[in-house]
Amino acid sequence: MDSDATFADLYPPDGPYQYAYGHAPYLDAVAQAVKNAGVDLDSWGAVAEVYRDGFLETSAFVEADNRGYCFRWTETAGWSYGYDRGDGYMLTLAYFGGEVLPSPDLVAATIARIMAGEVISDTAAGNHHGFAYREAMISAETIANDLPFERQLAAYRTHPGHVEVLTIQQETRAHIARQQAQEDAWLAEAPRADLPDGGA
């Protein structure tokens, strides 16, 4: 990604990427790294709310607790982990600390340690550009103008983990389109039972 890219360059109105889900490629990259580290995932995805966040849900249980962990990323505080409360929200146990946007391999290594039973006790949120906790940038408008951060996110658009997801999505859409075309053709040729002579 061009180091001089503007916000309009990163998120053109008619482009494939919109600001609300600009973090999706990063989460796909992290998910691939986590799977490569030997941790099974049930699901992952990007969420667009006032501040952008995302989640990873594991399909394996931590032996010490006999419960599965959830991992959450937010653009204000970085990565954290905890348990699913059962109502769609996560009970946070601790933040990873460090950068808000750590490398996928670093996230994967930390998650693998947690899944192996290690307790992460750092409850401090991450930092960004040397400042603790991006929520200090109090408005969504201010965060949206943080071009260095947006360029970092955009760099993951070519990551193999994201490209793999895009390929699956494209193949799925093409399959659905083919099925729809076949159904439409069948309906166009099928005789209509509500008309005399079968629709002739």
Image (spheres, helix red, strand yellow):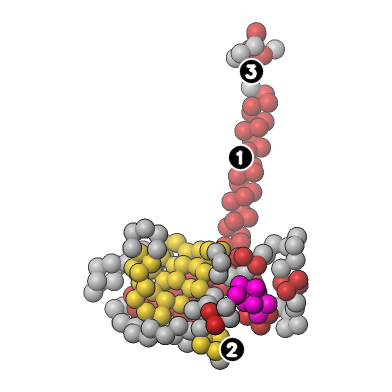
Q: Secondary structure at mark 2?
A: loop
- Residue 179's label in the rendered image is 1
**Residue plotted at (64% across, 43% down):** 177
Spatial CA distance of label 2 from label 1 is 49 Å
Task: Tell me the residue at 61%/72% (across/down).
Answer: 140
Query: Which residue position holds label 3?
Result: 191
- Spatial separation of the CA atoms under disc 1 and disc 3: 20 Å
Q: To which quarter of the image does residue 178 belong? A: top right
- Per the rendering, the mark at residue 130 is none
Q: Position of residue 193 (x, y in %)?
A: 60, 14
Residue denoted by label 2? 129
Q: How far across and down, in percent of the image, does residue 110 sit?
A: 41, 81
Residue 152 higher or lower than 157, as above or below: below
Dot 3 falls on a residue whose secondary structure is: loop
Name the amino acid type tagged 2: His
Residue at the (75%, 62%) spot, across then down: 13
